[in-house]
Amino acid sequence: MSVYEIVFTGQVLPGARLEAVKANLARLFQADEQRIELLFSGRRLVLKNNLDAAAAEKYRATLERAGALVEVIDLSAQVEEIEMAPAPAIGRVEVVPRDVYMAAFTEVDAPDYAIAEAGAPMQPPKPDVPPPALDLSQLSLAPAGSDLGQAKAAPAGPAPDTSHLSIIG
């Protein structure tokens, strides 16, 4: 079963007035002026996806009656399979220019990046790190359940000198 999506790029049908189309879409989508302006930003916007053929045609017809030029794209179309050229033995990719602009990059030394299988690790495994050498011979453990002790109180200061005081009675 084919799956379709409705794509809008902000274009209107020939002969349609832009303001009328914006008003029609605002009424159709029940959207405010700010959201409608986003539709006409010129970007490619997917208005609806995962549609069957009948629903896609219904959306296309409704939007074209409103004056919007939309595109119905078949998502289940076969993706062209591209075969990768074998990598050179030296582990570098040879860049072949596709146009004049890319011809400037013919002398670039590019590493040969391969595509790993799904689930393969992305990085080499980290080497095992040896544990640090610590001298713990001065430490000991108390038996399980024993009291670890209380914090020692600070030593009391010297008693105040009261020899100059007297009790009058």
Image: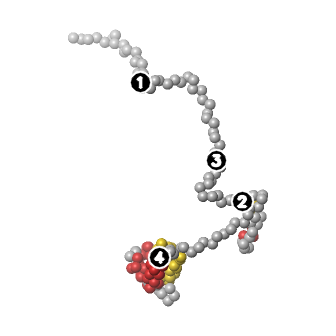
Query: Tag 3: residue type?
Result: Pro
Comparing labels 3 and 1, the label whose residue is closer to the camera: 3
Q: What residue sits right under mark 4 in the picture?
A: 52
Rendered location of residue 102, percent (x, y):
72, 70
Residue that numbered label 1 is attached to: 147
Q: Measure the alpha-carbon separation of dots 3 and 1.
A: 45 Å
Query: Which residue corresponds to mark 3?
Result: 125
Q: Nearer the viewer, residue 41 or 58?
A: 58
Q: Which mark is residue 167?
A: none
Q: Is residue 40 visible?
A: no
Residue 149 x %, y %: 42, 23
Against 136, is 70 above or below?
A: below
How much space separates mark 1 and mark 4, taking CA atoms?
73 Å
Q: Residue at x 24, y 11 (%)?
A: 168
- The numbered mark, 3 or 1, whose residue comes first in the sequence reads 3
Q: Is residue 142 above or below residue 83?
A: above
Badge 2 amino acid: Asp
Vertical side of 54 occupied by 158: above or below: above
SS at mark 1?
loop
Of the image marks 2 and 1, the number of the one nearer the N terminus: 2
Q: Amino acid at mark 4?
A: Asp
